[in-house]
Image (spheres, helix red, strand yellow):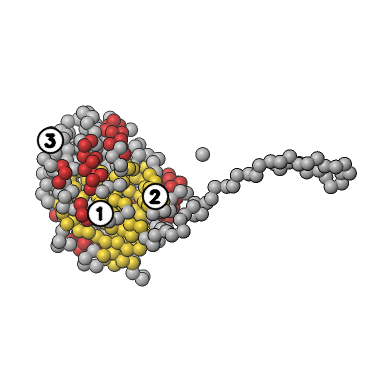
Amino acid sequence: MVLGSQLYKSSSTVANNPQTAKPAVQQVRAAQPSPRESTPSPAPTTRPLPAPKSPSQAAQKPVNLPVTVSIKAVGDIIPGTNFPYNKLPEKKELLFESVKPYLKGADILFGNFESTMTDYPYSSKGGGGGMLFAFRTPPSYAKILKEAGFNILNIANNHSYDFNEQGFNDTIKNIDSNGMKSVGKKGQIVYKNVKGVNFAFIGFSNYGEVHNSLLELKAGSEIVKKAKEKADIVVISVHAGAEGTGALNVRNKTEFFYGENRGNMVLFSRTMIDAGADLILGHGPHVTRALELYKGKLIAYSLGNFMGYRTLSTAGELGQSLILDVKMNPKGDFVSGKIIPVELDGRGLPSVDEDFRSVGLIRSLTKSDFPNTGLKIDDKGLILKTSK
């Protein structure tokens, strides 16, 4: 069964409507004698002392926490598909070759996996074609993602159910069994400890049947609060917003794409931070968007396309991407960051952009959409806090 619209941009469609698709559904002391009694008191029964209470989360922290912890994050990743016909690279080991050195160096590497990882033959979108596109990447590609350095892969997006529930479960299994963690299943919180700092990751999309829904702010706030009980830093991955070069700007309003409610990213992001989140990583529009500093926490409204081998349009701004490098203190407050500029070639493969085009684009969008946000982005991509 396919829920709602399954519209998707074909490669011949204008860049304003990039390729997309919607998923198909599915815790006494012994009594003492009165001092008035004249008879001798029997010796009190010896009882063991009560076990000490578990120390608080803070008390369990090592004394020497790091000054900062770091996350590198990238947007949509499709390393090729073999459905409905073969669009896989001859040498998959070379997919990340040009950017692999730049993916290293952070405590955590995050990406949005915009495909499935399964051999399941039956797509929720039939045979594809027209405006329906389904992506299926062989399970062997999990090793390539692990070797590139990824720790956390989001699967809360509009392609996670391209091959029904079986494909979704296979994707989770293949990611997790290769030393990474998938995030995005409804109700799921993924914890990871780095240098004594406990991280929690939660994935959201507008498909509330199978993922945490960004349209349900109260439920979203509750799962963030639950995560914050155990975690020092809560990271939100959210697949949301309209798509294409016409959707570069962020507005504090609900966005739609082909009639589908893709949420209000500003309201959602700020509400999650109010509930305890520390970093928001957006993806879905297939273009980069502005950055915002809200109550000392960083919001990246869209990380754009990072890899779309023979699947995603890379025309114009659709081919301008980044590796976002974020440094936070152990409480999740933004300290500094860097935009490492990336460009996608005609095949959808990433390399570092020595012309820094995405730096200029994100800087311009940030000034336009959030002029008083308290961030400064220099021409080489360094992101610093400013005094308001």
Residue 344: x %, y % from top left = 15, 52
**Which badge, 3 or 1, comes first in the chain's sequence?**
3
Residue 190 locus on image (x, y percent) = 38, 44
Residue 72, quarter of the rendered image: bottom left
Placement of the C terminus among the 4 image quadrants: bottom left
Query: Which residue is situated farthest in the right direction here?
Result: 38
Is residue 104 found left or right of 333 in the rendered image? left
Asked if the residue at tag 1 contacts the one at tag 2, i.e. Cβ–Cβ closer than 8 Å, the answer is no
Is 313 drawn above or below residue 334 in the view shown? above
Q: Looking at the picture, which amino acid does disc 2 mark? A: Asn
Q: Which mark is residue 86?
A: 3
Give the residue type at disc 3. Answer: Asn
* Circle 3: element type: loop
Whichever of labels 3 and 2 marks the residue nearer the N terminus, that label is 3
Element type at marker 1? loop
Q: For the residues marked 3 and 2, what is the alpha-carbon distance in whole angstroms? A: 39 Å
Please report whichever mark, 2 or 1, sits nearer to the chain's N-terminal start: 1
Left-right relation of 123 to 373: left
Number of on-image labels:
3
At 39% across and 46% down in the image, what residue appears?
Answer: 191
What residue is rendered at 35% in x and 39% in y? 185
Q: Cα distance, mark 3 to mark 1? A: 31 Å
Q: Nearer the viewer, residue 336 or 219?
A: 336
Q: Which mark is residue 104?
A: 1
Q: Which residue is mark 2?
A: 193
Residue 376: in sight, yes or no? yes
- Mark 1 neighbour density, 10 Å: few (under 14) some (14–19) many (20 or more): some
Q: Position of residue 247 (x, y in %)?
A: 23, 53
Determine the residue positioned at 41% across, 53% down: 196
